[in-house]
């Protein structure tokens, strides 16, 4: 009997997921029709309710459909002792790099100002700044941050990043620790957040952080809404200290209709789509780990639950 993979996705992509695993030696079952719970070997999940995974007594690995695992860390969500594998797949990485490049280039080339000019019918030229004079800082130099940093460096930007450990990425200055954070913020005209949401990183985009950025800086948050103190961001925009923000993620999602962020002229909102897991490439990552597990080999991209990422 083939092993069984249970899939729970919040997006209506059931058929795409089944197709992605069609050529592999694993039977796919959908969350709504799991059959005998004892037959489920692996689970690929987005946001399972507390206690829901405990119904499958023979689970061997939990795969997160997302790169982040914060949605799995609530009380009683994860059965004890099971390995949790993060989603790392090339389409998800490429999508995030596209999102970061798009917004960095927009801000760098003054597109918000030109769009305002267009609305007013105003012909206003702004002197061009070469990329090598534009300082971009990335909070987080993991799978996604490092890929975006490399792409920015390849375009010639002056790039720095902040991570827990030191990194050696060509063309990217590495910062770590509290002092490293201060140094990086002080130089970042465009700040990009690609951190995981943990107890240490929650609310890291706050008034104190914004105050350390140069006047006129832009903030791009493509990580989690829990990173950003939205009222502090609005205050920093209102005071003129920040010039604009691109936000893909919010404390409450969907963002409430009443949120002033929707109406702010210098806030650019997308609905948590900076990047999405693509079933065809995600299936390769899941199967690679299932094969490794079967062969008794180490899994790749295992989440460290103590570190929360
Ligand atoms: P990752 O590979 O685990 O990288 C996380 C990075 O953050 C690492 O560089 C890590 O440092 C650093 N970090 C963690 N805690 C830190 C701390 N306390 N101080 C300094 N640096 C810290 O994660 P990833 O795959 O790049 O994904 C990052 C996040 O992006 C995910 O967790 C998710 O929330 C978000 N995301 C959002 C979307 C979207 O559509 N909006 C899509 C995908 C992912 P070390 O390298 O030193 O460990
Ligand atoms: C999406 O937000 C992810 O974590 O992959």
Image: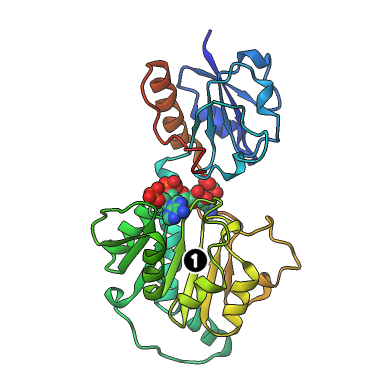
Q: Position of residue 245 (x, y in %)?
A: 53, 71
Q: Which of the two residues, 26 or 139, is positioned nearer the viewer here?
A: 139
> Does any portion of residue 143 appear in the rendered image?
no
In the rendered image of this protein, does residue 174 appear above or below residue 119? above
Furthest toward the top, the residue is 1
Q: Which of the two residues, 182 or 14, is positioned nearer the viewer here?
A: 182
User: Which residue is pictured at 50% across the width and 71% down the height?
Assistant: 209
User: Which residue is pictured at 63% across the width and 68% down the height?
Assistant: 230
> Does residue 108 appear to the left or right of 11 in the view shown?
left
Tell whether circle 1 marks a residue whose Cβ is less than 8 angstroms from ligand 1: no
> Does residue 195 appear to the left or right of 33 in the view shown?
left
In the rendered image of this protein, does residue 87 appear above or below residue 260? above
Local secondary structure at mark 1:
strand
Furthest toward the left, the residue is 170
Q: Position of residue 54 (x, y in %)?
A: 67, 24
User: Which residue is pictured at 65% across the width and 34% down the height?
Assistant: 77
Task: Give the residue at mark 1.
Answer: 220
How many dots with numbers? 1
In the rendered image of this protein, does residue 248 appear above or below residue 80? below
Q: Which of the two residues, 220 or 120, is positioned nearer the viewer here?
A: 220
Q: Position of residue 231 (x, y in %)?
A: 65, 71
User: Which residue is pictured at 48% across the width and 74% down the height?
Assistant: 218
Q: Position of residue 43 (x, y in %)?
A: 57, 27
> Does any portion of residue 178 appear in the rendered image?
yes
């Amino acid at each position: 009997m083939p092993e069984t993979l249970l899939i729970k996705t919040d997006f209506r992509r059931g058929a795409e997921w089944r197709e992605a695993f069609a050529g592999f030696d694993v039977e796919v079952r959908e969350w709504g029709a799991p059959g005998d719970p004892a037959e489920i070997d692996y689970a690929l999940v987005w946001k399972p309710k507390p206690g829901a995974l405990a119904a499958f007594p023979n689970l061997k690995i939990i795969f997160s459909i997302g790169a982040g695992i914060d949605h799995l860390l609530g009380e009683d969500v994860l059965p004890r002792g099971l390995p949790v594998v993060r989603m790392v797949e090339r389409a998800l990485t490429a999508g995030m790099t596209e999102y970061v490049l798009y917004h960095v280039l927009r801000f760098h080339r003054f597109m918000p100002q030109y769009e305002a000019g267009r609305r007013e019918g105003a012909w206003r030229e702004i002197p061009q700044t070469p990329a090598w004079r534009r300082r971009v800082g990335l909070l987080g130099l993991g799978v996604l941050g490092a890929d975006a940093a490399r792409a920015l460096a390849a375009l010639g930007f002056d790039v720095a990043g902040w991570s827990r450990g030191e990194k050696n990425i060509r063309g990217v200055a590495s910062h770590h620790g509290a002092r490293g954070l201060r140094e990086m913020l002080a130089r970042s005209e465009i700040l990009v957040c690609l951190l995981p949401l943990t107890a240490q990183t929650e609310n890291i985009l706050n008034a104190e952080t914004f105050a350390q950025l140069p006047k006129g800086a832009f903030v791009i948050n493509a990580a989690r809404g829990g990173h950003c103190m939205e009222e502090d961001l609005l205050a920093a925009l209102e005071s003129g200290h920040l010039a604009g923000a691109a936000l893909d993620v919010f404390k409450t999602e969907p963002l409430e209709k009443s949120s002033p962020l929707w109406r702010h002229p210098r806030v650019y909102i997308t609905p948590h789509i900076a990047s999405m897991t693509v079933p065809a490439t995600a299936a390769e990552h899941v199967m690679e780990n299932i094969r490794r597990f079967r062969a008794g080999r180490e899994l790749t991209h295992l989440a460290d639950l103590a570190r929360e990422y």
